[in-house]
């Protein structure tokens, strides 16, 4: 006997990304703001001056990829259990990608799912991490291997937060902006080449263009079954570097920068990218003092780590490779020999 469970339905998870000065918000429910000590000191007062709710609680957790763990998510959950949050309650992520990922993950599993709002305070999280509903934590096996898809109900991108951002964090966000352009929009890349991204008006335009690009992708592929995986250009290599260096040596955007350079070399080997394009991308990354090199100490271990990548399946590793500038390919047919030849370049070379 077979009994069908009919669950086909349309679920509208649509939401808006508000770019501009943070407007007043009233939430008719309990609210917890999840943040870290640094962001709290800089920006919590700014948010509280624009937020009203039935009750507001502040939960502070350590920030940094090394702290994006199940134990810190449990700390968030324990706090909201203690304050008797229910399914109408709302979490607000005030911070960068780490805070956003942990807050979203906690919201997705608390009483099987409650609402949350993203208020990203770093450039990287404004253009990428806060949009799209990816949540999760790291573990000993790799980055973001435990997580869910859980969309926020709103994202507020306020350029005000960037005024206190260190230059290195600012550059890390630029790596995610140029990633979008290389994969999807040649004209955008060419505009970025000549733009001054330290100009506030120019940066706001770059943020808007990046969010529009990501919105186009996730509206077609919310759960990363195909096209959305292209947004991980640079990440397949970058995640291995982050894990190898225990999330302490590089910022996420810096490993994406290095990862794009390695991916470009692989694309070049496969005839997808020419030398001029390789150098143009490197020149752009160097312009914002982003790293473009990494010395691989153990080639076999580096290659083996690819199999923990979420885009890979069984014995096939999926690589996201630019097809010139402005297009992208997902390839799972690249031979180990070809990949190892490229990795050897980074085992032998020193910083230029």
Image (tube, helix red, strand yellow):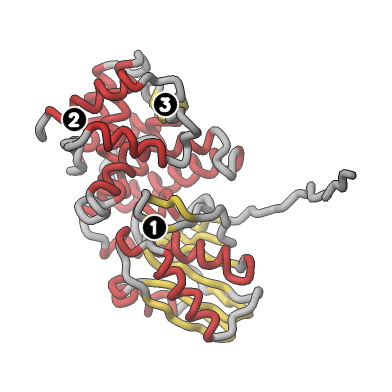
User: What residue appears at the point 50 percent right and 83 percent down from the top-left corner?
Assistant: 56
Circle 2 residues within 10 Å: few <14, some 14–19, many ≥20: some
State how far apart marks 3 and 1 are (Cα). 26 Å
Say which residue appears at 72% left-offset and 52% top-offset: 11
User: Disc 1 designates what residue?
Assistant: 97
Q: Nearer the viewer, residue 301 or 207?
A: 301
Provide residue 324's location: percent of width, then percent of height: 37, 21
Q: Is residue 311 above or below residue 120?
A: above
Q: Could you tell me residue 147's position as x and y percent?
A: 50, 55
Q: Position of residue 169 (x, y in %)?
A: 26, 55
Return the residue nearer the eye: 174 or 232: 232
Label 3 Cα crowd, 10 Å radius (few <14 / some 14-19 / many 20+): some
Q: Quadrant of the N terminus?
A: top right
Report the side of 338 relative to 185 (left or right). left
- Name the residue furthest front: 1
| Front-lying residue, 113 or 188 | 113
The residue shown at (48%, 63%) is 118
Q: Quadrant of the C terminus?
A: top left
Mark carried by residue 346: 2
Q: Residue at x 64, y 53 (%)?
A: 14
Which of the 4 image quadrants contains residue 16? bottom right
Circles 2 and 1: CB distance less than 8 Å?
no
Q: Does residue 295 appear left or right of residue 44 in this picture?
A: left
Circle 3 residue: 326
Front residue of 317/31: it is 317
User: Which comes sooner in the sequence, label 3 or label 1?
Assistant: 1
Q: Nearer the viewer, mark 3 or mark 1?
A: 1
Q: Which structural element holds mark 3? A: loop
| Circle 2: element type | helix
Contact between labelled residues 3 and 2, with CB atoms less than 8 Å apart: no
Q: Earlier in the sequence, mark 2 or mark 1?
A: 1
Visible residue check, residue 178: no
């Amino acid at each position: 006997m077979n009994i069908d469970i009919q669950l086909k339905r349309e679920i509208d998870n649509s939401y808006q990304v508000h770019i501009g000065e943070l407007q007043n918000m009233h939430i008719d429910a309990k609210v917890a703001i999840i943040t870290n000590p640094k962001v709290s000191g800089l920006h919590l007062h700014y948010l509280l001056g624009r937020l009203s709710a039935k009750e507001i609680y502040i939960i502070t957790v350590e920030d940094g990829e090394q702290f994006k763990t199940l134990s810190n998510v449990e700390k968030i959950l324990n706090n909201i259990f203690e304050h008797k949050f229910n399914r109408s309650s709302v979490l607000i992520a005030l911070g960068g990608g780490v805070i956003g990922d942990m807050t979203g993950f906690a919201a997705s599993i608390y009483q099987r799912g409650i609402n949350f709002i993203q208020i990203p305070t770093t450039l990287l999280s404004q253009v990428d991490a806060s949009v799209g509903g990816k949540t999760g934590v790291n573990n000993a096996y790799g980055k973001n291997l435990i997580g869910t898809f859980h969309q926020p109900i709103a994202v507020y991108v306020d350029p005000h937060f960037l005024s206190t951002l260190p230059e290195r964090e600012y550059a890390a966000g630029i790596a995610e902006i140029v990633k979008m352009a290389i994969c999807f929009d040649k004209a955008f890349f060419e505009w970025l080449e000549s733009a001054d991204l330290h100009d506030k008006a120019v940066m706001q335009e770059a943020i808007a263009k990046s969010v529009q690009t990501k919105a186009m992708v996730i509206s077609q592929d919310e759960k990363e079954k195909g096209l959305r995986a292209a947004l991980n250009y640079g990440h397949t290599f970058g995640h291995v570097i982050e894990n190898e260096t225990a999330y302490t040596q590089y910022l996420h955007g810096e490993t994406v920068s290095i990862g794009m350079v390695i991916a470009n070399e692989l694309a070049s080997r496969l005839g997808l990218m020419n030398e001029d394009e390789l150098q143009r991308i490197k020149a752009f990354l160097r312009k914002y003092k982003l790293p473009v090199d990494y010395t691989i100490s153990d080639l076999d271990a580096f290659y083996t780590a690819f199999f923990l990548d979420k885009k890979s399946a069984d014995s096939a590793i999926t690589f996201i490779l630019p097809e010139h500038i402005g297009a992208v390919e997902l390839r799972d047919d690249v031979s180990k020999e070809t990949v190892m030849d490229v990795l050897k370049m980074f085992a032998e070379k020193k910083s230029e």
